[in-house]
Image (tube, rainbow, N blue to C red):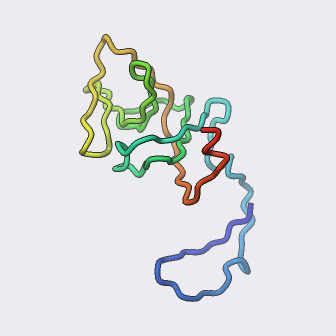
Amino acid sequence: MKFIPITASAGITGFESPASDYLQLPLSLDELLVEHPSATFIGKADGHSMEGVGIFNGDILIVDRHVTVKDADVIVANFNGEFICKILNISERLLVSANAQYESIVINEDDHFTIEGVVIRSIRCHRVSHLLESNI
């Protein structure tokens, strides 16, 4: 993969082509984004409850099942048969939203709750990908 080192900000009206100075990175996107390939899956965010941590509706989530879950991790879990993405508060047994419009969810003993993995990366697509729309 070729890496073009540019910093762009709104309002730039003209600048040299950054392609003239590029660096060859010894990485692929897979290597950059996925640390444990056999324990990683990709999901798609649905809703607005995690916008406070930069996860927006339609974003792609890279979820790692290998990493140890820590307090305040963003996780994907199965909660009573529904897959959800929330911040885990271990000591208070809460699933916390990152948007004040959504209440936290208490994890009770009667609930079916399993952590599927930790969200280690999220990706925002700025154009619709027909591959992603049909497969995720």
10 shown above or below 37 = below
Going by the image, does 112 lie left or right of 24?
Answer: left
Count of marks placed on residues: 0
Residue at x 40%, y 37% (from the top left corner): 73
- Residue drawn at 44 percent across, 34 percent down: 75
Question: Based on the displayed image, in which of its 4 quarters is residue 128 positioned?
Answer: bottom right
Q: Position of residue 57 (x, y in %)?
A: 44, 47
Q: Going by the image, does 122 lie left or right of 2?
A: left
Q: Estimate the x, y position of residue 28 in percent, counting from the top left.
A: 72, 52
Judge whether 126 appears above or below 20 on screen: above
Question: In the image shown, does 105 or 94 lie closer to the viewer?
Answer: 105
Q: Position of residue 1 (x, y in %)?
A: 74, 60
Question: 25 or 124: nearer the eye?
Answer: 124
Q: Nearer the viewer, residue 135 or 40?
A: 135
Residue for point 39% across, 15% down:
112
Query: Hey, which quadrant is residue 127 in on the image?
Result: bottom right
Residue at 41%, 52% in the rendered image? 54
Query: Left or right of 59: which side holds 72?
Result: left
Q: On screen, 16 above or below 53?
A: below
Residue 14: which quarter of the image? bottom right
Residue 36, percent from left and from top: 63, 35
Q: Residue furthest top?
A: 110
Image quadrant in which the C terminus is located? top right
Above or below for 27 versus 17: above
